[in-house]
């Protein structure tokens, strides 16, 4: 049986990477009032930006239901696949719980579940490692065990352009958001133990914040795993290109990829966000 790597739409893997490694994606949902869209299927990053500009309501997101996982797992199992699912942090969404419930319903089926305790390409990097191991013939339990050990080594941080989305998503008070925007504060958000933490606040230009993000990522260059580094952004193409070029100059990884955040991640961070995501080495 072949192993099919499955992740959810918050992994923000590019279409090129998904096709290259035959990774399956199950979408979370995005609501604009009564209208519901499947992330990455009904709503592209470009469509999301237009919706944000024109909709009178703020977007809300919803996890994948267990029934949707059961349908997907049945389809893949019927095709002769073993299944490894890597999903968004259980501290941020109930999607991994839904996948686990579905796996329990299919008791005895060759399904492994990994809680990434991360988001965006923090999930994606795990999925890519899993896909490469599967291509080399590693068994399902070995891949799952390896990814579980990698989870705490994944480092994720991003700079937010505006505090409005963090406020509307319940991460900041209205006063904090208003003051932050007036003072041109760009917070650096970090994923710590599966949750979002405001690690630093920068006052000034976005360029200054981008430089600090690079400094954060490269403070201990020798610890960076050389396989993958991702620069992921939400409609911040120029920042992403600049950061990726700087990282490539340093020859830190075999592949420094640029990916664009989907609608779910963008709903919580907002346009202008850019981040760096990578894994640390095993020592």
Image (cartoon, rainbow, N blue to C red):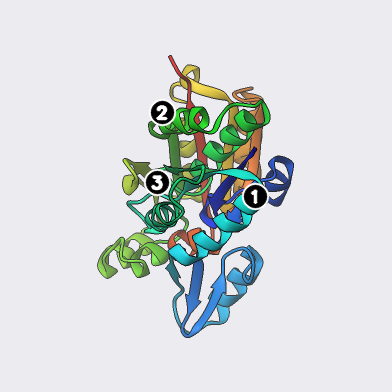
Name the residue beneath numbered marker 3.
188
Name the residue beneath numbered marker 2.
149
Residue at 57%, 57% (x, y): give it: 74
Q: Return the mark for residue 114.
A: none
Q: Earlier in the sequence, mark 2 or mark 1?
A: 2
Where disc 3 sits, the SS reads: strand
User: Within 10 Å of the Cα at label 1, are there few (<14), some (14-19), or many (20+) other Cα atoms?
Assistant: few
* Inter-mark Cα distance, 3 to 1: 18 Å
Q: In what quadrant of the picture does the N terminus appear?
A: top right
Residue at 48%, 85% (x, y): give it: 34
Nearer the viewer's eye, disc 2 or disc 1? 2
Name the residue beneath numbered marker 1.
238
Q: In what quadrant of the picture does the C terminus appear?
A: top left
Task: Find out whether the residues at labels 2 and 1 contact each other: C-beta distance under 8 Å.
Answer: no
Residue 22 placement, left or right of 279: right
Residue 177, how many percent across, how many down? 33, 64
* Res 239 seen here: yes
* Inter-mark Cα distance, 3 to 2: 26 Å
Would you place residue 181 above or below residue 223 in this image?
Answer: below
Residue 173, how many percent across, how many down? 26, 66
């Amino acid at each position: 049986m072949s192993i099919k790597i499955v992740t959810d739409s918050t992994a923000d893997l590019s279409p090129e990477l998904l096709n290259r490694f035959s990774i399956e994606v199950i979408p979370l949902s995005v609501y604009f009032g009564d209208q519901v869209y499947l992330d990455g299927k009904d709503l592209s990053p470009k469509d999301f930006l237009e919706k944000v500009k024109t909709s009178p309501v703020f977007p809300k997101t919803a996890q994948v239901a267990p029934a949707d996982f059961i349908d997907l797992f049945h389809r893949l199992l019927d095709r002769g696949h073993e299944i490894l699912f890597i999903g968004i942090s259980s501290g941020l969404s109930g999607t991994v719980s839904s996948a686990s419930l579905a796996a329990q319903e299919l008791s005895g089926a060759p399904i492994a579940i990994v809680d990434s305790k991360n988001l965006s390409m923090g999930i994606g990097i795990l999925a890519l490692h899993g896909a490469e191991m599967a291509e080399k013939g590693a068994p399902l339990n070995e891949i799952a065990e390896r990814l579980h050990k990698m989870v705490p080594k994944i480092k994720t941080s991003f700079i937010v352009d505006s505090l409005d989305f963090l406020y509307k998503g319940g991460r900041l008070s209205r006063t904090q958001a208003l003051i932050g925007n007036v003072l041109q504060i760009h917070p650096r958000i970090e994923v710590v133990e599966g949750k979002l933490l405001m690690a630093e606040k920068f006052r000034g230009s976005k360029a200054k914040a981008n430089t600090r993000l690079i400094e954060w990522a490269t403070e201990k260059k020798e610890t960076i795993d050389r396989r993958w580094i991702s620069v992921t952004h939400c409609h911040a193409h120029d920042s992403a290109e600049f950061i990726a070029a700087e990282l490539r100059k340093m020859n830190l990884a075999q592949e420094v990829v640029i990916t664009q955040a989907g609608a779910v991640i963008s709903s919580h961070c907002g346009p202008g966000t850019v981040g760096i995501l990578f894994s640390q080495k095993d020592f």
